[in-house]
Amino acid sequence: MKNLPVKFSTNQKFAAAALVFGLLAALVSFTKSNNNSDLDLQQLASLVENEKDHIDATELADWIMQKRSDYILIDTRSKSDYNEYHIPTAQNILLQKLINENFSAYKKIVIYSEGGTHGAQGWFFLKSKGYKEVYFLRYGLNEWIDDLLFPKVSKEMYESNSEEYQNIARKAAFFGGEVELSDSTNIKTKTYRREGC
Amino acid sequence: MNAPFYKYDIFSFDQSLIIAFIIGIAFGFFLERAGFGSSKKLAAQFYFYDMTVFKVMFTAIITAMLGLFWLSYFGFVNIYLIELIPTYVLPQLIGGLIFGVGFVMGGFCPGTCAVAVTTGKIDGLFTLFGMMFGIFIFGEGFPLIENFYYSTNAGELTLTEYLNIPYGVLVFIIVIIALLGFYGAEILEKKFSKKYEKLAR
């Protein structure tokens, strides 16, 4: 290096290094993927594995209670099921229609169904259509009913009247449900395996 | 080795606060060493006779950008797990404007005013109080602006997604922009340092 005819300052050396690393970055991005599809499966798998693909009932309830306007809530069940009951602010769009629908790119999209499956499948459809912020309700309407409308709390929790309990009760009441008492023994054994998906 | 460490549970939430504290101290230290504890230095940016702020910030940007690109390319960082602040177009435009006005008026941005206070600058103290007051007003008035705050959501938007160009190509383009910027900054400094000779001292 000492024999170079021109002396480079430290700044110039760093600048040259940045230029080289930047140029290499551009080159490797052309060689790396032969995958022509726009679908980035690596990214999708990463989102799923790290549980960034869904939200839970309490989070959704918060959004509704805050009257937030930055999300679209979609109920993929049949028209009659939807008419019988649906989560407030939800609109009824069946999966077959969902794939042809155009949504605002500026809103979060939350999909739910009876259980978790159809919501998750709808999530994949919309993701593959290029929507950025799509989520599904993890265990679907079942979760909404079990965890939010009619949450089961232990007797101790009910009697303690703690802030946590009040929070649960307030949310249930807001959406027209109520807290149910249960034996503390079977609280953790509830399952979401109901019919439908 | 896999990063982001926090997302892979390498350390707990409590430990993450300690690490954040250490990083914060380092951030403050380097801001101070770059001379950003002085509002004169920061204001010089807007008169073009001292472009240190621009140079330091853009150097940090391309260093982090190149580091992240290559670390993720070789599999050390899962880039999809890096937390991005969702883009809310209008609210952030307005927020940026308020930030800019505050910066020009106070001569500090939030980080540098804290640095200035620790080195005993009175104007830094006033900016810090102003910032705290702003935070208080924002917090108390939040219900009034909540709807606006969550409007025009564009999600976790990145330039590669928005412009639909490969990640590496974008990295290269930004490096070029930075290098041209540094070159331009030096020219501006030469041109304006004469004009503001008295201020510069």
Image (cartoon, rainbow, N blue to C red):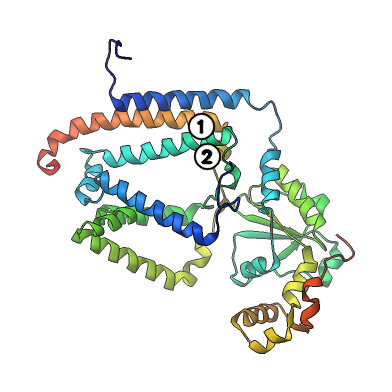
Nearer to the camera, B141 or A29:
A29
Q: Quadrant of the C terminus of chain B?
A: top left
Q: Quadrant of the N terminus of chain B?
A: top right
Image position, residue A135 (x, y; %): 69, 55
Asked if disc 2 and disc 1 are in contact, CB closer than 8 Å, the reply is yes
Disc 2 marks a residue whose amino acid type is Leu
Chain under disc 1? B
Q: Counting other residues with Cα less than 10 Å from the Cα at mark 2, is it few (<14), some (14-19), or many (20 or more)?
A: few
Residue at which label 2 appears? B159
Image position, residue B122 (x, y; %): 19, 61
Residue A28 against residue A176 in the figure, above or below: above
Image position, residue A41 (x, y; %): 71, 39
Looking at the rendered structure, the number of numbered marks drawn on it comes to: 2
Chain under disc 2? B
Residue at which label 1 appears? B170
Q: Residue at x 60, y 24 (%)?
A: A30
Nearer to the camera, A39 or A81:
A39
Nearer to the camera, A117 or A4:
A4
Q: Residue at x 50, y 52 (%)?
A: B89
> What distance separates the C-alpha of mark 2 from that of mark 1?
8 Å
Helix or strand or loop: what does disc 2 sit on?
helix
Dot 2 or dot 1, earlier in sequence: 2
- Relative horizontal placement of residue A24, taking residue A192 as reference (left or right): left
Same chain check for tags 2 and 1: yes
